[in-house]
Image: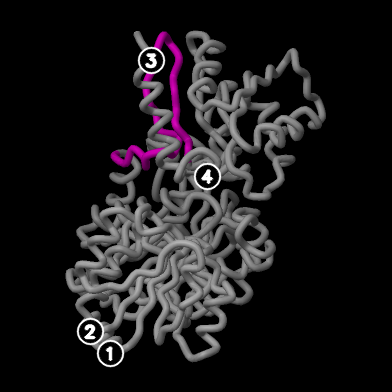
Amino acid sequence: MTLRAYLDSLSGKKVAVLGVGVSNRPLLRLLAGSGACVTAYDRRDRAALGEAADELTALGIALSCGDGYLESLEADVIFRTPGMRPDVPQVVDAVAAGAVLTSEMEAFFEVCPCPILAITGSDGKTTTSTLIAEMLTRAGVRCHLGGNIGRPLLDITDEIAPDDAAVVELSSFQLMTMKKSASVAVVTNVAPNHLDIHRDMAEYVDAKRRVFAGQTPENRVVLNFDNEITCGFAAGAKGRVMPFSKQPLSGDGVYLKDGAIWVNAGGKAEKVLETADIFLPGLHNVENYMAAIAAVWGRVPTEAIRRTAREFHGVEHRIEFVRELHGVRYYNDSIATSPTRAIAGLRSFPEKVIMIAGGYDKHLSFAPLAPEILSHVKTLVLCGATAGMIRAAVESAEGFSQEKLPILETDDFSQAIELARANAAPGDVVILCPACAAFDKFPNFMVRGKTYKDYVNSLPE
């Protein structure tokens, strides 16, 4: 189905868009010209929406805002914002009355004219998605990168040609109601995350599984065989499984051997890339490269993969070097919104670091993080809603000593950076590595990371 045909199918229908956030605003503009009767729903009041409310009204879109904004929900088609659970009572009632529940990304899967490569996982999604797009681009493929990475794609569908490639990062929230699967699906890993939103771990795992559940034997699913959950996905996969692992594999797949990444495909083994040639630090980035290589193998030549390793310097907020001041190097790893991601960040440095951690509580255990902090951190600076929880986990860990690991605590983010600076000596590394989401103090991890970088860059010489 083309985008035009899809929009024509909505003409004359009542269409509800739940959430007037960044991902849904291009969708609302698109729907405004479809002939549908469109209503935008948002929990914020009109004044809080500001210019966005005026723009939507000028487009002929009705608004339902503020307290009780969903009480009047009545529609033929409902576009759910990713952050909203599909079992909200008003949504459930509307679906029971005949409404079709979908989303901007689900609609894109319906109309995209080119192959889709979809990436999900608990950690590494954005870097892996970006690596795939970089490799395809260097191979001469016109690539469209979007989804959870921050760029909606439905509104640019008319610009996409059949020979292009769409690379989409998908969150568990986007996948909860996804019915179609990509031609290439990648699951980087699965570990406890977002349990403040998901009912339980089983629901979270099931959401991740949906990225490949609708595949056919002609499709490919890339799975991390070092992760117990994703390795278990292989048994139920309908597409061709292309695993990756830090250990040698007996069949087809991507693996590490003798300091290099190898690919075994069709019984032929090929050394693709020396890990020393990868600019990005950390074993987790080697894993991201293996996942990306498994996704593009057969479409991207080896030299394009090697060029990517040499030339790609990373994604903002992911162990991002900020500056060196008085011999101290400052890094921004604001994307480390879970304990597992924070562990990967800490393991990326050979020396012990000064770690700034803490933030919004996602109902995750910090017990697995505690021994890693003991091994990799020389001073721990805590800030935010979870400061006490992280402190308790670290102080309860075997081998903890206040003399060996000073723990400093403040509720002010700027003061946390100052405490880290005051305790740093030439040769030290200071890293914002929160192990938590940012919502206790910031709208998202990007704003947190930018605030950190701005403050660090403002420190006097």
Q: How is the image coloured?
A: one colour
The disc, 4 or 2, on the residue closer to the chain's N-terminal end is 2
Question: Which amino acid lies under the numbered mark 1 shown in the image of this protein?
Answer: Gly
**Count of numbered badges drawn on the protein:** 4
- Name the residue that disc number 1 marks: 12
Q: Bin the neighbour count of mark 4 within 10 Å (Cα to Cα): few under 14, some 14-19, many 20 and up.
A: some
The disc, 4 or 3, on the residue closer to the chain's N-terminal end is 4
Give the magenta part as a residue range. Answer: 311-334
Question: Which amino acid lies under the numbered mark 3 shown in the image of this protein?
Answer: Leu
- Name the residue that disc number 4 marks: 439
Residue 59: % across, % down: 21, 70
On whether residue 60 falls in the magenta region, the answer is no
Question: Which amino acid lies under the numbered mark 4 shown in the image of this protein?
Answer: Phe
Residue at horizontal 71 percent and vertical 41 percent from the top: 368
- Name the residue that disc number 3 marks: 459
- Name the residue that disc number 2 marks: 35
Quarter of the figure that contains the C terminus: top left
Q: Bin the neighbour count of mark 3 within 10 Å (Cα to Cα): few under 14, some 14-19, many 20 and up.
A: few
**Can see residue 258?**
no
Dot 2 and dot 1 residues touching (CB under 8 Å): yes
The disc, 1 or 4, on the residue closer to the chain's N-terminal end is 1
Mark 2 → mark 1, Cα distance in angstroms: 6 Å
Name the one closer to the observer, 21 or 221.
Answer: 21
In front of the other: label 4 or label 3?
A: 4
